[in-house]
Image (cartoon, rainbow, N blue to C red):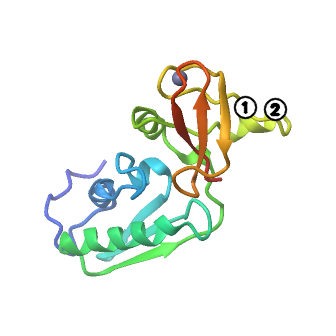
Amino acid sequence: MKASAPSEHSVGSVNAAEIERLLESVKDPEIPVISIRELGVLRGVKVENGAVEVTITPTYSGCPAMDFMRMEVERTLKQAGIGNFQVKQVLSPAWTTDWISDSGRKKLLDFGIAPPPHSADIRALKGGSPAIACPHCGSTETEMLSQFGSTACKALYRCKACKEPFDLFKCH
Ligand SMILES: [Zn+2]
């Protein structure tokens, strides 16, 4: 363990943990409660000789939210007085819904969006669709109305129990 980190962001004293904390303020533009770290888009932060390297992986190629999140990362770093940085986009390994953290899944649910099933559950069903639980009442008596919900990253569902429509986060 090293001694406690300095709290200023001046170049030369920044550390990766501090920058990760800073980037916690960068949210998914479509789901403003979930940060890019919780989404699994933020892959890593490296600080070497005062140079900051932030690695991000898009949820899927061509995701319109990615450009925004990248710009937000750059804006947040600049605002903190960090000038020497690079935002690198890494496509491999590809992002999967499994990278959404547990706190991220809970926030999706609280926001009224059903979190995506884990890929292991999807594989176990051998092509069948896993039951999607309604974020409002928890019932798994749900049906898909449309492959595309309010954005390309979501599918539109309806709950047969409480009759409420809801989005499923499905980017994968
Ligand atoms: Zn319901």
Element at label 2: loop
Element at label 1: loop
**Which amino acid, mark 1?**
Pro
Residue 155 against residue 83 in the figure, above or below: above
Q: Which residue is mark 2?
A: 125
- Checking the image for residue 107, the label placed there is none
Image x and y of residue 10, in percent: 16, 72
Residue density around tag 2, few if under 14, some if 14–19, many if 20 or more, within 10 Å:
few
| Disc 2 and disc 1 in contact, CB within 8 angstroms | yes
Residue density around tag 1, few if under 14, some if 14–19, many if 20 or more, within 10 Å:
some
Residue at the image point whose x is 40% and y is 32% from the top: 110
**Residue farthest to the right, as pictured:** 126
Q: Quadrant of residue 17?
A: bottom left
**Which amino acid, mark 2?**
Leu
Q: As drawn, is 84 to the left or to the right of 59?
A: left
Sequence-earlier tag: 2 or 1: 2
Residue at the image point whose x is 26% and y is 68% from the top: 76
Image x and y of residue 46, in percent: 40, 67
**Residue farthest to the bottom, as pictured:** 84
Query: For the image shown, how many numbered marks are present on the structure?
Result: 2
Residue 85 against residue 129 in the figure, above or below: below
State how far apart marks 2 and 1 are (Cα). Answer: 7 Å
- Nearest the viewer among 75 and 152 is 152
Q: Quadrant of residue 145?
A: top right
Q: Which residue is mark 1?
A: 130
